[in-house]
Amino acid sequence: MARATRPSEKALPGEIANSDLARTAKALGHPARIEILRMLLSRQTCIGCDIADRVGLAASTTSEHLRILKEAGLIRGEIAHPRVCYALAPGAVEPLLQFLTELNEAQSLLPLEE
């Protein structure tokens, strides 16, 4: 779900808006959400109650973490009534990975401090 960028953060053609990068990074900023992504990585798809059991949190708390991951575009959820099956969203981290790679390459050009 792309949000409009403010004039001060317009992305150049081919670049990802700062707000989109920040939303992805923020979604990755909680240990429970990392655990959910690891689980989906190993199992490809999973229902919500299995995820709640794995992370050891209440279903409502797990649901909130899933909502954040879904809004950030990192996962997708398909309703298989009465359950929702979650899976990783293909290519979702590519913009963040590209940005981090650019940062890493730029830092490697900086002189080492003594």
Image: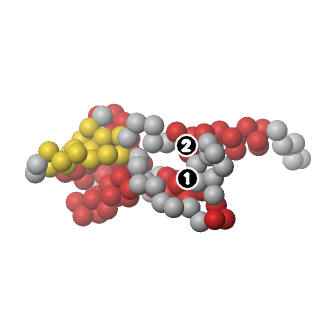
- The first of marks 2 and 1 along the sequence is 1
Q: Nearer the viewer, residue 79 or 52?
A: 79
Q: Tell whether label 1 touches label 2 (CB within 8 Å).
A: yes
Q: Where 5 sits versus 98, above or below?
A: below
Q: Position of residue 60 (x, y in %)?
A: 24, 64
Q: Position of residue 26 (x, y in %)?
A: 50, 58
Q: Alpha-carbon distance for marks 2 and 1?
A: 7 Å
In the rendered structure, find residue 21 and report the number of the disc placed on it. Answer: 1
Q: Position of residue 86 (x, y in %)?
A: 27, 44
Q: How many marks?
A: 2
Residue at figure coordinates x 40%, y 36% from the top left? 90
Label 1's element? helix
Q: Position of residue 73 (x, y in %)?
A: 41, 49
Q: Where 73 sits versus 64, above or below?
A: above
Residue at figure coordinates x 87%, y 47% from the top left? 113
Q: Nearer the viewer, residue 36 or 99?
A: 99
Label 2's element? helix
Residue at figure coordinates x 70%, y 44% from the top left? 103
> Position of 95 compared to 78: left or right?
right
Which quarter of the rendered picture does the N terminus lie within? Answer: bottom left
User: Are there few (<14), some (14-19), or many (20+) residues within 10 Å of tag 1?
Assistant: some
| Amino acid under disc 1 | Leu
Residue at figure coordinates x 14%, y 45% from the top left? 80
Residue 75 in view: yes
Res 45 quadrant in image: top left
| Amino acid under disc 2 | Pro
- The residue beneath circle 2 is 95
> Position of 18 compared to 39: left or right?
right
